[in-house]
Amino acid sequence: MESESRKLWLPTQALNLLISFFVLCCLVYGVGSCGSKRNEATIKYERMIDSITSDFNNYYIDLQAIDESRIRQLQFDVNKFQTESAFIENENAQSSLHTAEKFLSTLSEERNICLKEMELKKNILQKTKKDAATILTTNAENQLQMLNQKQFDEVKYRAEYLINRFNAHILLIETLTKAKEKHSE
């Protein structure tokens, strides 16, 4: 009799162990897959932050390269060409030189303001990247909207504008220099 009860008990116990093992495996897989999804989301979020930061750093470096001495030299060249006899009566050249003079008079101040704003935005990006895992687990949707690239684009576009205008005025001076050389020949 004992052997019959033992036969019934062993398959039931084995079935219970098998079911318990299956449930445990499902839990481990479920928790593991949630963790990997979060890690993938965190990695994606950090890459987005790295991309914005890299873009910012490029503009920041280019804007820093426009130092006071380069601005003063360009202002000197603009003033020199405004009084140059070859260009005194050339309305297009005088108009371009006047525009350059006006832009260069405010460039230092605008450049410094833009650099400070870029530094603030870079600090926000660094802090956000540092807290990426926490942000994604607490309030991901709100934070992803908060890190909208548009809030960084305004400063980036201002830096790009200043850099491009400065380079355009350098090109103007180079063009006028070549025109002067051809005129004096």
Image: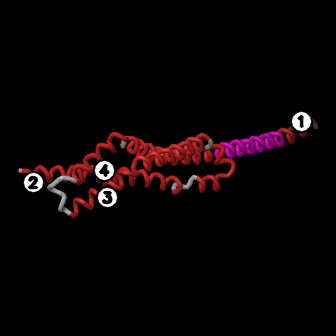
Which circle, 4 or 2, is nearer the viewer?
Answer: 2
Which circle, 1 or 2, is nearer the viewer?
Answer: 2
Predominant secondary structure in magenta?
A: helix
Q: Secondary structure at mark 1?
A: helix
In the depicted structure, whether residue 89 falls above or below residue 62: below
Q: Is residue 21 found inside the magenta-colored segment of the image?
A: yes
Which label belongs to residue 46?
none
Question: Alpha-carbon neighbours of circle 3 within 10 Å: few (<14), some, or many (≥20)?
Answer: few
- Residue at x 9% of width, y 54% of height: 183
Q: CA distance from mark 4 to mark 3?
A: 14 Å
Looking at the picture, which amino acid does disc 3 mark?
Thr
| Label located before the other in sequence (4 or 3) | 3
Query: Residue beneath label 3, please?
Result: 99
Image coordinates of residue 7 in percent, x first then y, are: 85, 39
Query: Residue beneath label 4, please?
Result: 167
Quadrant occupied by the N terminus: top right
| Label located before the other in sequence (1 or 3) | 1
Q: Which residues are magenta?
A: 11-33
Which circle, 4 or 1, is nearer the viewer?
Answer: 4
Query: Residue beneath label 1, please?
Result: 3
